[in-house]
């Protein structure tokens, strides 16, 4: 079966079975082409909560499917590939953070959206990479325990010197493994290119950027910019998507190693199987966990 035949079958089945397909922008182009919505993790969950379909397939990683379920408990939410987890989201659990909180009782716990639903139940507010700065700024508290991403946390802490931050040593293994040498090499090869980076990268990399932002932030910046060349410091699928969308511009990966194997776990056949009702994993959250995690997300919406 050719890729376009599989895509046709998916489009037919999703209509027949009242399915909405969400694809995170780190997914491959053939998956994005069959999706109803594409974008960043939080944007997708918000879109899903507005649609009337009874089933939602999330092509991304587990915490993203959980976020969809938190906001849309009445829908059947399917994670397209049951093995697709985010190592950063699974790095810290509820029990560990509950213990850490005892050491910092007067700190507000700010959780990056890349956390499990269970962990969110013991946190005060969620943030995304695009809303983190604004939300930390708006919080009444000037003492913040930021989890789990040390790199994102230290980037924000630097921008808010009036607040005290405690950071733990979590982070994204894909973004954090890229060092300054990769930036210097890419800049040497493409001296006229602007360097756009995700704040999950290490500080010495972020310091060299022309723009720092979330996946959608990076894409919007590149679309609107008058510049013609860009080095992209986030998952390499963004290089492909931008190149397809803006053929008059040039996009270069910061490193060939910026590939998230979890985001790449989902295939078009996985999506087809989910549409047939024989693939993926149906996300179930008990009501106590869902409501505990939702409190954290509602606070983000209120402040953001
Ligand atoms: P976004 O929230 O920007 O979609 O990022 C999710 C992610 O996993 C980044 O590595
Ligand atoms: Fe998680 Fe990093 Fe993959 Fe994003 S890129 S899903 S943070 S492992």
Image: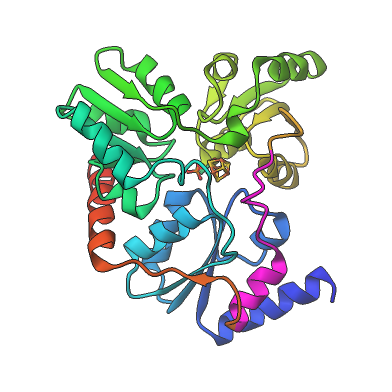
* Point 35% across, 19% down: residue: 157
Identify the image's colour scheme: rainbow, by chain, secondary structure or one colour.
rainbow
Question: Is residue 105 inside the magenta stretch?
Answer: no
- Residue 159 in which image quadrant: top left
Quadrant into which the C terminus falls:
top left
Image point (38%, 74%), residue name: 75
Vertical side of 183 occupied by 16: above or below:
below
Q: Is residue 157 left or right of residue 162?
A: right
**Residue 71: percent from left, percent from top:** 33, 62
Residue drawn 33% across and 75% down? 74
Vertical side of 79 occupied by 192: above or below:
above
Closer to the camera in the image, 124 or 236: 124
Quarter of the image for residue 186 reads: top right
Residue 6 visible (yes or no):
yes
Q: Where is residue 146 drawn, in percent x and y?
A: 33, 30
Residue found at the far bottom of this picture: 16
Q: Is residue 304 visible?
A: no
> Which one is in front, 270 or 22?
270
Q: Is residue 87 left or right of residue 125?
A: right
Count up the numbered dots.
Answer: 0
Span of residues in magenta: 259-276
| Image coords of residue 60 (percent x, y) | 56, 56
Q: Quadrant of the N terminus?
A: bottom right
Q: Residue sitting at 42 percent across and 50 percent down?
A: 42
The quarter of the rendering in which ligand 2 is drawn is top right
Q: Is residue 286 above or below residue 252?
A: below
Question: Does the segment drawn in magenta span residue 274?
Answer: yes
């Amino acid at each position: 079966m050719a890729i376009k035949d599989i895509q046709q079958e998916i489009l037919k089945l999703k209509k027949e079975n009242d399915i909405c397909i969400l694809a995170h922008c780190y997914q491959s182009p053939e998956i994005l082409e069959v999706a109803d919505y594409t974008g960043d993790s939080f944007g997708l969950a918000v879109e899903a909560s507005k649609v009337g379909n009874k089933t939602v397939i999330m092509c991304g990683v587990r915490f993203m499917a959980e976020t969809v379920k938190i906001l849309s408990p009445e829908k059947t939410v399917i994670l397209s590939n049951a093995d697709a987890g985010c190592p950063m989201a699974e790095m810290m659990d509820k029990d560990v953070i509950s213990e850490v909180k005892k050491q910092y009782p007067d700190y507000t716990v700010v959780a990056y959206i890349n956390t499990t639903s269970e962990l969110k139940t013991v946190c005060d507010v969620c943030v995304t990479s695009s809303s983190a700065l604004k939300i930390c700024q708006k919080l009444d508290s000037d003492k913040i325990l930021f989890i789990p991403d040390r790199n994102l946390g230290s980037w924000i802490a630097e921008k808010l010197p009036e607040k005290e931050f405690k950071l733990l040593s979590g982070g994204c293994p894909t973004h954090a493994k890229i060092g300054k040498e990769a930036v210097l090499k890419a800049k040497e090869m493409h001296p006229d290119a602007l360097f756009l980076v995700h704040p999950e990268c290490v500080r010495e990399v972020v310091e060299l950027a022309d723009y720092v932002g979330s996946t959608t932030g990076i894409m919007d910046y590149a679309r609107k910019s008058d510049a013609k060349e860009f080095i992209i410091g986030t998952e390499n699928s963004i290089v492909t998507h931008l190149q397809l969308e803006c053929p008059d511009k040039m996009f270069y990966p910061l490193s060939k190693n910026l590939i998230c194997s979890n985001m790449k776990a989902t295939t078009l056949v996985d999506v087809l199987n989910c549409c047939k009702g024989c693939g993926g994993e149906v996300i179930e959250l008990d009501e106590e966990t869902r409501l505990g995690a939702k409190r954290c997300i509602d606070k983000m919406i209120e402040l953001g």
